[in-house]
Amino acid sequence: MSSSDAAQVVGARILRGPNLYFTRPAAKLTLRVPGYLGAEPARLRLLAREMAVRAKDTGQPGTAARRGVVLRIVERAVRLLMREAGVVRVGVRVRPGETTDEVVVAIALNNAGRAQAVADGIGPLLNDLLGSEPVAEVFARAGAHVRAQPLGDRVRALRPKVPVVAVTGTNGKTTTTRLIAHLGMTAGKRTGWSSTDGVLVQGEVVEKGDYSGPGGARAVLDAPGVQFGVLETARGGMLWRGLGTAHNDVSVVTNVSADHLGMDGIDTLDQLAEVKAIITKVTKPEGWVVLNGDDPRVWAMRATAGGRPWCFSLDPESPSLREALDARGRGITVLDGDIAVLLPGASPDRLISLVDVPMTLAGLSEHNIANALAGAAAGLGAGLPREAVVEGLRTFTPDHRLNPGRMNIYSVSLPQGGMATVVLDMAHNEAGLEALLRVGRGLVRPGSQLQLGLGTGGDRTDEILVRMGEMAGLGADRVQIQHKEHYLRGRSMEELESFLRQGLSHVGVLPTASWPDEFSGLTGLLTAAHDGDVLALMTHSHWATLHQWLMRNGATSDDASAIRRKAVVARGEHEAESDIAALWSLEDDAARIDAAFALQQRFPKDGRVLYELAGAHDSAGREAEALAWYDKALAQRIDEPYRHRALIQQASTLRLLGRLEESLAILDRLVADHPDNSAVVLFRALTLHDLGRDTEALRATTMQLVTMSAEADVQRYLNSLTRFTAAIDEV
């Protein structure tokens, strides 16, 4: 290889704000140096000595030891070049690139022209250094060339004149950004924010598109009259262009989890955490760095952060909270169901109960509880009034209006009859899928199913796709695959689906269908759904289309009270469970019936309430009236276990009224559906006795006792008792 091929610049960019390498603008150069990696040890040792680089052992060509020496030589070459160009003090960072012969060089430069001159000159310089020309002459010539080029425009990061909150993380950053912006508006501030949705001021879209980079920051802060800025900050913008602002008043890091690994030289979670930490390093010293104390990589960012630590944690006993308070910082957590702020040496300040925070989805959404903690801390840290933060938490709803694409929940009439719940969420990685499955499962009423529309972008690794398939198979009752045709990212649908299917097969699940796009996936799920099912869809660019279609076709967007009701029902309870319990604590029959009627007035077509009203009449000995109410109750939906109990009580009431054949018909169906239910067997035996079929009643009751008893003596004589019971003859 000739010396002219020894090194070349394959990438050059200006990072116009704080970045992975410096807290100020820099030039980032990517070089390929195969000539240095493959040079003879003696030649490299001589060059290192002439450049005053300590390299006693230069390593064999192509080895890791050689790579380390080459990195030091390249760094020294850049510093000597800048010195010859008249720049005495300059920051230089050198890192390994994505391939063995690749080197990344970052230089803290404030002038675009100087950065371009260095980019143009460093490749020829490195090539010449491996030639026969004296090293001093090579540097003198290269330095003179750089010095002769115009400085060009000065590169400066925007210096905000209003309070700014910067938000990053793998999951939750868009929701947290929207929440903090809502808190700002609730406080009466003219608020602008940027995110993956665009640039908004006071909730009105100024620019549509992905503005989670420096362009969004500039657009927000340049908007007329903005008094408070909230900037979602994605990894891509930080890596490719740097931060959009020189500093912030509050920084928030929600979490760090596996996503987009293997891109832009970021291959590990530790590397990803280093990128996310950029916003914390430029927080003002008097500002606050709001960090997830439940994520060790995030909490470790406090060591290099510019501001004071404010820890948020779901665990009130977390050591991270104690560490924050010991450092004269603050904490925020959940205490006895309340969001509470912790300050050193003070009693907890309880802001609001979780049940009054709609974005937590009645407590189902653990990740949104964390987002609420982070958002509240950021609002308070930015100087928003406490009462505005509390009111903002109370009024920020997770619907299509305030938080589109994030856990939006709908009630939908099914074409085949009944109602289903649809959850649309832009879950795109393992953490997002886990959150979606948790919320979906928490809305499934007893006897119904969670059906999942599984799909993600093609820029996930094969391993992540397989794990998402495993998670889907374990977390949902049925899975349909739905593709995102615009986000295949170089994969074919067949390839992407093969990895999802591989993960599903690991847990013994097969997808029930596969769809080419999200809309087909939604309609497919609705067609397969039954009354009470929850349909959870991982959506992306088609969210607006799906939302509009649902609303045109009669769906309703669930508000906080509707979500709370569904969550209560999913637990097998009723929203009036305490009133029902109070009803049955009454000893007076008339008072109990009056209380049941009062409940029925509040819930006139509620099957569970009608069942309790029937039972109140039954317990008072008013069987004929009870029977009419049982009929009305069973005409409505009643979830288990109350439905089969209503049938048992209906059959018992029919027996007491002398309608024995009707009673037996109901109990025959029940014993077929619930063969292990001893109460059904016993009530059936009573009806058989009244019909004069005592032998059959005895045989059924004895067989149930023999089958279900765990007593030692019954087990000891099990074979004999089973044989004797089967031999009981009809009289």
Image (cartoon, rainbow, N blue to C red):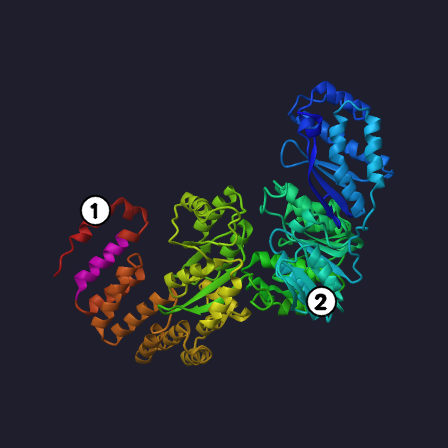
- Give the farthest residue toward the top: 42
Percent from the top left, x then y, of residue 184? 71, 66
Q: Which amino acid type is shown beneath numbered disc 1?
A: Ser
Percent from the top left, x then y, of residue 590? 41, 81
> Circle 1: is it few (<14), some (14-19), or many (20+) Cα within 10 Å?
few
Q: Main secondary structure of the magenta part?
A: helix
* Tag 1 residue: 720
Residue 515, quarter of picture: bottom left
Magenta stretch containing residue 694, yes or no?
A: yes
Dot 2: what SS? strand
Determine the CA span between mark 1 and mark 2. 81 Å
Q: Residue at x 28, y 63 (%)?
A: 670
- Counting residues from the start of the chain, the first of labels 1 and 2 encountered is 2
Q: Residue at x 76, y 45 (%)?
A: 26
Q: Can you say which quadrant of the picture contains the C terminus?
A: bottom left
Magenta stretch containing residue 435, yes or no?
A: no
Q: Which residues are magenta?
A: 693-706
- Give the farthest residue toward the left: 731
Residue 701, quarter of picture: bottom left
- Between residue 639 and residue 529, name the one nearer to us: 529
- Between residue 696 and residue 387, name the one nearer to us: 387
Q: Which amino acid type is shown beneath numbered disc 2?
A: Thr
* Tag 2 residue: 191
Q: Is 589 left, or right, of 211 in this rendering?
A: left
Q: Is residue 109 visible?
A: no
